[in-house]
Amino acid sequence: MPDPSAAPLLAVRGLDAFYGDIQALFGVSMQVAPGEAVAVIGANGAGKSALLKSIAGLLRAPRDAIVCEGEPIGGMAAFAVAARGIALVPEGRGLFPSLSVEENLMIGGQLKRAGPWSLQRVFELFPVLAERRNLPSTALSGGQQQMVALGRALMANPKLLLCDEISLGLAPIVVRDIYARLPAILAQGTSIILVEQDIVQALKAAQRVYCLQEGRVALEGATKALTREQIAAAYFGV
Amino acid sequence: MSDSKRVRVVFESRASRIALVLFALGVIALAAAPYWGGRDDLQLLAEIYAYAALASLWNLLAGYAGLVSVGQQAYVGLGAYLLFALAILLGLSPLWALPLAGIISGLVAMPVAGLVFRLRGHYFAIGTWIVAEVFRLAASQVSLLGGGSGTSLPASMIIAIAPSRALRDAVEYWVALALALTILVAIVLLLRSRYGLALKAIRDSEVAARCSGIDVMRTKVLVYIVTACGTAMVGALIFLQRLRISPDAAFSVNDWTAFVIFITVIGGIGRIEGPIIGTIIFFVLRQTLADLGTLYLMMLGLVAIAVMLTAPKGVWGLIAERFGFSVFPLERRVILDDGTARK
Amino acid sequence: MDWINVIIQGVLVGGLYAMFAAGLSLIFGVMRLVNIAHGDLIVLAAYLALVITQTLGIGPLTALLIVVPAMALIGYLLQRILLNRTLGDDLLPPLLVTFGLSVIIQNGLLTVFTADSVKLQAGAIEVDTVRLAEGIYVGVLPLLQFAVAVAVIGGLQFVFYRTALGRAFRATADDPAVAQLMGLDNRHVFALAMALSLAVVAIAGVFLAVRANFDPSQGPARLIFGFEAVIVGGLGSLWGTLAGGLILGVAQAIGAHLNPGWQILAGHIAFLIVLAVRPQGLFPKVRM
Ligand SMILES: Nc1ncnc2c1ncn2[C@@H]1O[C@H](COP(=O)(O)OP(=O)(O)O)[C@@H](O)[C@H]1O
Ligand SMILES: [Mg+2]
């Protein structure tokens, strides 16, 4: 069990983030401990993707607003953040259509960071991908594409995995199937931030939760300690 | 609006009205140039008008319609060759041949548009260049007009313009001034028309423009043809003044495209005033650095690159931003009759 | 016999055009950039080879060992310092900057080397011929050039589809933002693509210089031939580009055979016909 009092793997402090002139985040703070799974929930437009993009380096951020293992990484280029072991599974999966399934995975591993994950191990986690390794990624079903996106991120052997709405557009049974693989990932010591609109799965998988509302943290706490009513209030802002 | 105040739509602002008056006074002074200037002055001024017109036309094409062509020399050369052909082969007076060359070039531009518009974006640019090369190579196959080495306008034709040399210089000068002004006014009117609004909408967002019922392709083709027509007339005039034509000179990419693009970009692309300012800068620099030859062209290229990367709105963009000012106002302002203006 | 010879000559020249085209096609595939200075860079490579062969006293083919890495380095720096800054939604900056570059290179060469045409001497190999069949002889040099062109296209195909670099190219072309999440620095990837493009340019430039006289004004025509080969072959397909180059070469050879003044015109007309009847090219493939 991860120890929340240990030095955080990631700390976000008072982060403001912008899409051009539009401010998407207002003073957001959060922490992730090593090996911990944290859920970030919130309605559409709450700023969940903005938070993950800021961490991953796709949105500008003040240097000290994001700290990874004690080192400020805010505003660092996305490729440099990736090299530090933070991998984002982007919303909508973002597979490369002109690459085959296997090539999509290989490009995830092109940084050659050491760690438990390899093509072999990813195929063990998602056996269906091994059968389809030579197909173009576009030829797969939505759930399988999501597995490729997850596998691609794992290939970088990240310390922290950022998942942006991995349940988006998938049938509930497929969502359950994918969530069933998360413990195997956590077991390797990887921390996960799970961004979801569909909160049931996320709350089950995570130890702690942050609820975003209009770009601000409306509620945070251990998933077990919070009631449905508290979460509903923070989610819908009623 | 709940209360029924009366509303007017106007283009002008006070500053632009003053500027327009100054502009008109300037035009009158320039029109009188044959009375105060020498032959060299007239030639230089006519060349300035030609470049201002070419740059304004390219600006309409690239800056307003987003059609970045590097092949407008096709129409400079076509207009020039048509003028020579109409004059030499059909015996038409050069002054009549000039507008006719424009019209024929506009007609030629239609099937050409059908071809080059199949290429998008960057590839359109190179496609236009190939068209210009085809015209050049075709022109050098016309042995009646001297083939690859070109030909001269016969003396009888030259005399047909005006009997004395001084008068001829003056006539050609006035034609040059009139042509440049006509082109400038035509561009302003076009941009103020519904086509201008369509172009602005297309520039803001092509998809949105298409959704709001603007026929994007038709508008662009129209601009392409109008530009071809104007460019051809300017080309015809330039070579009427030179009295000699050859394929390499008439279809020169350096003279009719490189300079024109650099002028427009340095002056300020996408603004009416840009090409004019650019032309002035171009000639001031050229008169002072005349001896540098190819170095001048390289320097101009460097400056244009630097402008594009650091101040993409050009010199006029910088001026207009600082002073909030334009001579040829294109923006509509809605005036409530209580005197408040809104954009 | 006559016509067979004409077509063979056209095919052999077409290989050179395919090399012009391959570099152009490569950078368009990776970063949607059309480099108007492409032809002038080919001529620059030719002059570079001229200077190197003269100062070091080595043959043109040996000079490739220097010209290729030198041009690749120029390409890397050009992209990294200048051209990366022009990429974006707006078409104008890349067009204008590469057009400006074209004018600068062309006039720079003119200032240094004058407008006189020059040629690289390759020695005995220039006049060697082999007999293909009764009455059909081809020069060893054109044959070598053609073989190199096929090898270059094959090599590019290999790099693009079989190596990590090619994977990075294709991923960045697909989605530059997501590619960054994989640890790829777009600016570096684009610069590598330009380096590779100019490495091909270097090879093309040296063969151009050995084949015939050249002068500083020839760049734009090389750009246009390359471009025509790309469009005729179909966007995004390297083997299509080779086919496009060959078709262009044969069209020019036929034109020249009918009337020496029609050589270039015939190529342009072949291009315009393809554009009119089959604008997607003969062997299109939407993405590289
Ligand atoms: N590309 C964009 N440009 C401008 N505003 C954006 C963009 N993407 C999202 N936004 C706005 O930023 C806010 C946060 O968006 P986002 O982070 O995508 O929310 P979520 O992922 O929680 O649905 C929303 O108000 C949204 O409208
Ligand atoms: Mg989102």
Image (spheres, rainbow, N blue to C red):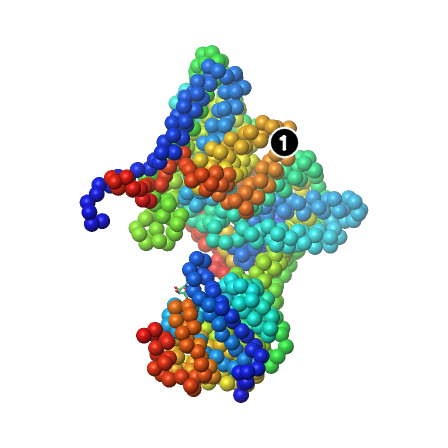
Amino acid type of disc 1? Gly
- x%, y% of residue B241? 49, 22
Element at label 1: loop
Label 1 within 8 A of ligand 1 by Cβ:
no
User: C212 and B84: which one is in front?
Assistant: B84
Q: Residue at x 48, y 72 (%)?
A: A29
User: C65 and C84: which one is in front?
Assistant: C84
User: A82 and B125: which one is in front?
Assistant: A82
Q: Is residue A48 left or right of residue C144?
A: left
Q: Residue at x 59, y 48 (%)?
A: C38
Q: Residue at x 52, y 85 (%)?
A: A184
Report which residue position mark 1 lands on: B293
- x%, y% of residue B195? 33, 42
In this rendering, the count of numbered labels is: 1
Specify few, some or many for label 1: CA neighbours under 10 Å numbering under 14, 14-19, or 20 or more.
few
Q: Find the residue positioned furthest to the bottom.
A: A1
Residue A73 drawn above or below residue C284? below
Residue B162 visible, this orientation: yes
- x%, y% of residue A81? 57, 68
Residue C21 visible, this orientation: no
Q: Residue at x 51, y 31 (%)?
A: B280
